[in-house]
């Protein structure tokens, strides 16, 4: 319902991309366009960007041939773009990142580590096994779980419905707090 309203009001810009280079360029351009909106800007960085990639200059020009044997592939680390995004590009925006893990024992630590390292305001943590039914909202001062009930699941509710409602509420509070401190 919230998503449909946002979509109808044209209040969300969905950006598609193919490559890492394209994603990083589009993200930089989007933040430049949002910078003057200050606390009214919300960056919901839900892209599933891998931790590693093959640099463009190392991509094969043609199809790899199995007759050449197993390829030797060297991966590079994806640049950590969240730090400049939060500190320089849109420092007054509400920035939300995601942390997906497979091990429940390390998820909360990884979420808190991200908050401490990048100084943004919200990390949405999820586990690969339960990503469609539960997420953990982690902020510098609190953490709580949004979870679908069996009735929600039976009714076809998606976790995004609860997440969008929660983030909308948090963004409204963030805007009000920012206005009060100006």
Image (tube, rainbow, N blue to C red):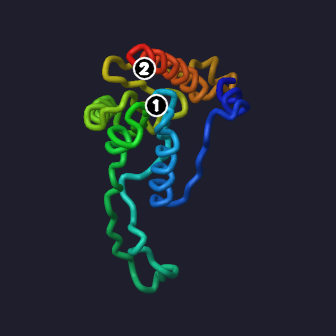
Name the residue at 27% across, 34% down. Answer: 113
| Quarter residue 73 falls in | bottom left
Name the residue at 42% across, 70% down. Answer: 56
Q: Which residue is mark 1?
A: 38
> Hey, which residue is sitting farthest front in the picture?
182
Q: Is residue 9 left or right of residue 19?
A: right
Where does the N terminus fall, quadrant-wise?
top right
> Which one is in front, 169 or 85?
85
Measured from the top left, where is residue 69 in percent x and y? Answer: 39, 81
Q: Secondary structure at mark 2?
A: helix
Q: Which residue is mark 2?
A: 178
Does the rendering let one see residue 105? no
Does residue 138 sit above or below 79 in this rendering? above
Disc 1 vs disc 2: Cβ atoms closer than 8 Å? yes
Measured from the top left, where is residue 102 in percent x and y? Answer: 38, 40
> Which one is in front, 130 or 165?
165
């Amino acid at each position: 319902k919230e998503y449909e309203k946002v979509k109808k009001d044209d209040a969300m810009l969905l950006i598609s991309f193919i490559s890492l280079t394209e994603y990083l360029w589009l993200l930089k351009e989007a933040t430049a366009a949002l910078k003057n909106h200050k606390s009214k800007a919300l960056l919901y960085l839900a892209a599933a960007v891998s931790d590693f990639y093959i640099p463009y200059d190392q991509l094969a020009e043609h199809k790899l041939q199995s007759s050449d044997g197993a390829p030797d592939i060297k991966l590079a680390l994806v640049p950590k773009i969240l730090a400049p995004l939060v500190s320089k590009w849109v420092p007054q925006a509400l920035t939300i990142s995601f942390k997906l893990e497979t091990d429940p024992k390390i998820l909360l630590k990884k979420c808190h580590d991200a908050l401490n390292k990048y100084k943004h305001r919200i990390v949405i943590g999820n586990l690969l096994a339960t990503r469609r039914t539960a997420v953990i909202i982690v902020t510098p001062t609190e953490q709580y779980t949004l979870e679908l009930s069996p009735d929600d699941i039976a009714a076809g509710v998606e976790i995004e419905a609860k997440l969008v409602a929660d983030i909308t509420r948090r963004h409204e509070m963030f805007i009000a707090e920012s206005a009060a401190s100006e």
